[in-house]
Structures are given as C-alpha cells and as structure tokens.
Image: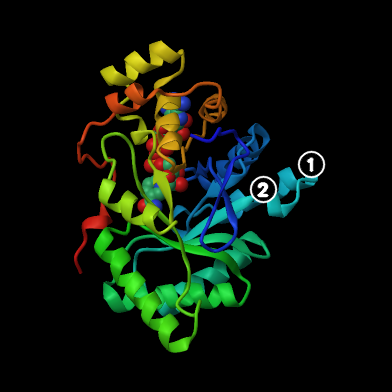
Amino acid sequence: MAKLDINTKYPMNSGFEIPVLGYGVYQTPADEAASVVHHALKTGYRHIDSAVAYRNEAPSSAGMNTFMKETNIPRGELFFTSKVPARNLNYENAKKVIDETLNKTGLDYIDLYLLHAPYGGKQGRLGAWRALVEAVEAGKIRSIGVSNYGVHHLEELEQYIKETDAKQGKGKGGILSVNQVELHPWLARPDIVDWCKARGVVVEAYSPLVQGQRAKDKTLAMLSKKHNKTWAQILIRWSLQKGFVPLPKSVTKSRIEDNANVYDFELSDEDMKSLDTGEYSPCTWDPTTSRD
Ligand SMILES: NC(=O)c1ccc[n+]([C@@H]2O[C@H](COP(=O)([O-])OP(=O)(O)OC[C@H]3O[C@@H](n4cnc5c(N)ncnc54)[C@H](OP(=O)(O)O)[C@@H]3O)[C@@H](O)[C@H]2O)c1
C-alpha cells in the first residue's frame, strides 16, 4: 500500500484531485460550523463535506474563509462538497440549489457536488445529473458525483452517460467522479465498491465511525490495545486502507485532532481480516436499495 499522510490526495475521473481525509458536518449546528471547520483546517484537514440538507454550507465556508485569510493558504488547497437534496430531485431543483450554494457560501466554485440520494425516479435522477453537468460546463462546479447509489442506480447513470456521449460528443453526458455511501466494517458493500473501483470512481465512506454505535466492539478493543490507538482511529485507518475517502464528523476539538492522527500506524492484513464481518448493518438510512 502506498504511504498515506494527511496531505494525500486521490485523482478523480474529472482530472481534479480529492484530499483523502474529509471532515463531515452532518448534524453540526449552524452556529458551531464556522468554528469547528476552522479547527479542522488548522488541524490539517483540507476537505469539508457539507450538503444543502445540513443547513450549514454558509458557516462552513465562513470557517474556510477565516482560515485562508489567517494562513494565506489558497482556495485551491481546500476542497468543499455540497449535495442536491434528496427531496424533489429533478433538473430545475438541482439547477436552483447549485446557484444557491454559490450565493450562500460566496465561493467562486464548488469542488464537488453530489446528488444526495437516488430518490425521485429515473427521470428525476437523470434530470438532476444533467443540471450538474451543465454547472460543470458553466464553471460553477469542478467535479460531480452521486451519493447512496446502489449498483443498479450506477448502471442507469453509466448507460445515460454512454448514450449521451455517443449522441452529443465525448464528455457531454458528464463524468462520474465519486459515489459517497455508508461504509464501515459492518457494512462493507463489496458490490458497490468493486463497481466504483473498476471505473476509477472514488468511494467516499460516510458514517465511518458508525456514529459511535460500535465503540464497545470487542475486535475494535483488541486492535485498539494492540496499536495503542482509539477505536475511532482504528476505524478511520480501516477506511483509508480500504482505499476509501473517510468523512469522520466531530464537533469536539480533541476528537477532530485524534481523528486526523492516523498516519503513524498501519493495520496488518490480519487486522484488516479481523474486521471482515460480512454484516449488512447500516447505522443510518440506506437509499442504495431503493427501486423506484
Ligand atoms: N450522504 C449521506 O447520505 C450521508 C449520511 C450520513 C453522513 N454523511 C457524511 O458523513 C459524515 C460522517 O458521518 P456521521 O456524521 O453520520 O457519523 P460518524 O462520523 O460515523 O460519527 C459521528 C459521531 O461520532 C462521534 N465521534 C467523532 N469522533 C469521535 C472520537 N474520536 N471518539 C468518540 N466519538 C467520536 C461524534 O461526536 P461529537 O461530534 O459529539 O464529537 C458523532 O456523534 C457526515 O458528517 C456527513 O458529512 C453523509
């Protein structure tokens, strides 16, 4: 495995790069977001994962702005993600929320914009995707992707991209760079991961800490003792070693720091195997299985 550190980035199909450790802000109250995002950036994270639905895009970008002013670190070193809400997913709504994100955040461009979930039927999904593609052409977004897409949703999108490219010219169907799904040892989703890896689609791991629900797991306790690391650090390291882009969330400053302190140890092949549970146990919603 190539050596990882806090500055590691992966290439995306779009041609841009994504910082491998993300910082999630789901359930981060708007009045805390600026301060915790600022702290995460000071700690060394360079990648913020927000969404329209989180209602904290503006304060999250305010935290980025304060950090950039203080450090002279340029915008190009930071990475900001937002997502088209799952409700009423269609072309018009997607077009509207992308402009709203730009207005609310004051950012010149958004690094990555995702469709939050594959609800809304085929027409809604592909219409919203078309709005993302147009926003890339207009320079509003750099890279685009999806979230909570199962293999059947990914195949529908791949088919659309192929047909559109064939009819209108290469690239006109858009370029799929990322699929963001819940991933941890109790939900390893080999089907989705293999599909994405075969096509160079970056896999982002949300709820990489299982929202704290497995803190007392026995295997985690054993690995934690062995490596002198916390259960949370073991889970982030598992995600990194699987080749994912983990997005741990914390509003606690010491935990923000601990969650980034994962580059001075490595899980062995045997350690990784001990975390192969084969379970299907989502800790949040699971739209990947939706069939509408
Ligand atoms: N696309 C989607 O549908 C989707 C869905 C869910 C999440 N996400 C993304 O993924 C990110 C992370 O997922 P998540 O927020 O569901 O859960 P998570 O990162 O798995 O867990 C967050 C929880 O773990 C606690 N925690 C964090 N670090 C800890 C540590 N070192 N020790 C002990 N507890 C710790 C946090 O508490 P404190 O905050 O109180 O410290 C919080 O309660 C989200 O913020 C969001 O960006 C995306």
In primary-sequence order, the first of circles 2 and 1 is 2
Q: Is residue 88 visible?
A: no
Question: Which residue is drawn at the image coordinates 29% and 27% (left, top)?
Answer: 273
Q: Mark 2 CB in 8 Å range of ligand 1?
A: no
Question: Which residue is drawn at the image coordinates 46% and 60% (left, top)?
Answer: 83
Q: Which mark is residue 64?
A: 2
The residue that disc 1 covers is 70
Q: How far from the left and from the top, in percent, is residue 219?
A: 29, 19
Q: Is residue 55 above or below residue 258?
A: below
Three-letter code for the amino acid on which mark 1 is drawn? Glu
Q: How far from the left and from the top, in percent, is residue 53?
A: 43, 57
Question: Which residue is drawn at the image coordinates 19% and 65% (left, top)?
Answer: 291
The crowd level at tag 2 (other Cα within 10 Å; few <14, some 14-19, many 20+) is: many
Question: Which residue is drawn at the image coordinates 69% and 49% (left, top)?
Answer: 77
The crowd level at tag 1 (other Cα within 10 Å; few <14, some 14-19, many 20+) is: few
Q: Most extreme residue toward the bottom, as rendered? A: 167
Q: Nearer the viewer, residue 70 or 164?
A: 164
Q: Nearer the viewer, residue 88 or 117?
A: 117
Residue 116 falls left or right of residue 261: left
Q: How far from the left and from the top, in percent, is residue 70?
A: 79, 41
**Which secondary structure, mark 1?**
helix
Q: Is residue 169 visible?
A: yes
Real-space CA distance between mark 2 and mark 1, rounded to the nearest whole angstrom: 10 Å
Q: Nearer the viewer, residue 41 or 240?
A: 240
Examine the image and state in which quarter residue 277 appears.
Answer: top left
Three-letter code for the amino acid on which mark 2 is drawn? Met
Q: How far from the left and from the top, in percent, is residue 45?
A: 60, 39
Q: Quadrant of ligand 1?
A: top left
Specify the quadrant that holds the C terminus.
bottom left
Image mark count: 2
